[in-house]
Amino acid sequence: MKKTAIVFLRVSKQEQIHQRQVDGVKDYATKHSIEIKEWIKIKVSGSKVKDYKDLILDTAIKHKVDYVMFEEVSRVGRKLNETTDLKEKCHDKGIGFLITSQNINTMPDGKRVDATQNLIVNQQLAYAENWAAMHALRVIGGQAASKKKIGRPKGKANSLLILEGRKDNKKILDALKRYHQIKPKLSIRKIAKQLSNDKKKVHASQVFRIKKLAISVGAFKSI
């Protein structure tokens, strides 16, 4: 019998978009013959899991699905107690967590929780919460040490500095310009794969961010 799922997509900033997550989940669902019953797309901080976890659970129960699908673990949320509570409530209803980019499935047989897969999700959730806490400390520390406002740079000039100021960003930008000339054009994932090597992996999300920034500053009309 064909498996079913709802999909939850979350971004933190209003200027961000869900398309990268959409593409990744669609590819996974097609390859694994999973029917998507509903897409939930929201823009909210991952620290506010309690604001949307009931929506996820209620939607999954309404459609009587096998899974709640996420593109990656950090998209679930960055509060360990809230996200594990959501996961356990889904498990109690026979609904598994399926993380497409990492191919993690907490209930692969649709009947019982896989202890190993569940542990991996818990570890990843703990890492996501720790990352958020460390990031907040860095911002607070920077504000205390400087009279200037610390945060994400604003404006076209600052965006251009972000693009060209770091070696990794410049490498991705150059690749986007180069592969933009190829027909058919290479996808974001393929460009990331081309740039990756044994020493360092370039993620599609990083390439997508640089692409969006490049368009915003006029480096490209379209990529």
Image (tube, rainbow, N blue to C red):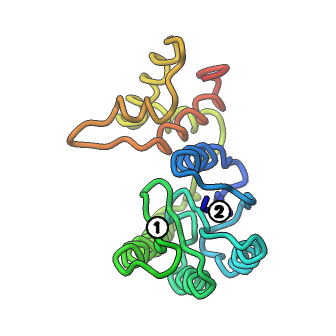
Q: How many marks?
A: 2
Q: Which residue is mark 1?
A: 105
Q: Position of residue 191 (x, y in %)?
A: 43, 29
Image quarter of the C terminus: top right
Label 2 sits on what residue type? Thr
Report crowding for label 2: few under 14, some 14 to 19, many 20 or more residues within 10 A (C-alpha): many
Q: Quadrant of residue 201?
A: top left
- Mark 1 vs mark 2, CA separation in Å: 13 Å
Q: Position of residue 42 (x, y in %)?
A: 73, 61
| Residue visible at 65% across and 62% down in the picture | 4
Comparing 142 with 55, the one in front is 55
| Residue visible at 46% across and 69% down in the picture | 108
Q: Position of residue 161 (x, y in %)?
A: 50, 35
Label 1 sits on what residue type? Asn
Relative to residue 27, is residue 149 depicted above or below? Answer: below
- Which numbered disc, 1 or 2, marks the residue that appears first in the sequence? 2
Comparing 31 with 22, the one in front is 31
| Residue visible at 49% across and 62% down in the picture | 146
Comparing 164 with 126, the one in front is 126
Report crowding for label 1: few under 14, some 14 to 19, many 20 or more residues within 10 A (C-alpha): many
Q: Position of residue 29 (x, y in %)?
A: 58, 51
Relative to residue 145, is residue 211 depicted above or below? Answer: above
Q: Which mark is residue 4?
A: 2
Residue 105 visible in rendering: yes
Relative to residue 221, is residue 107 depicted above or below? Answer: below
Please report contact status of discs 1 and 2: CB closer than 8 Å, yes or no.
no
Q: Is residue 161 left or right of residue 69?
A: left
Residue at the farthest right position? 62
Q: Is residue 198 left or right of residue 214?
A: left
Relative to residue 32, is residue 120 depicted above or below? Answer: below
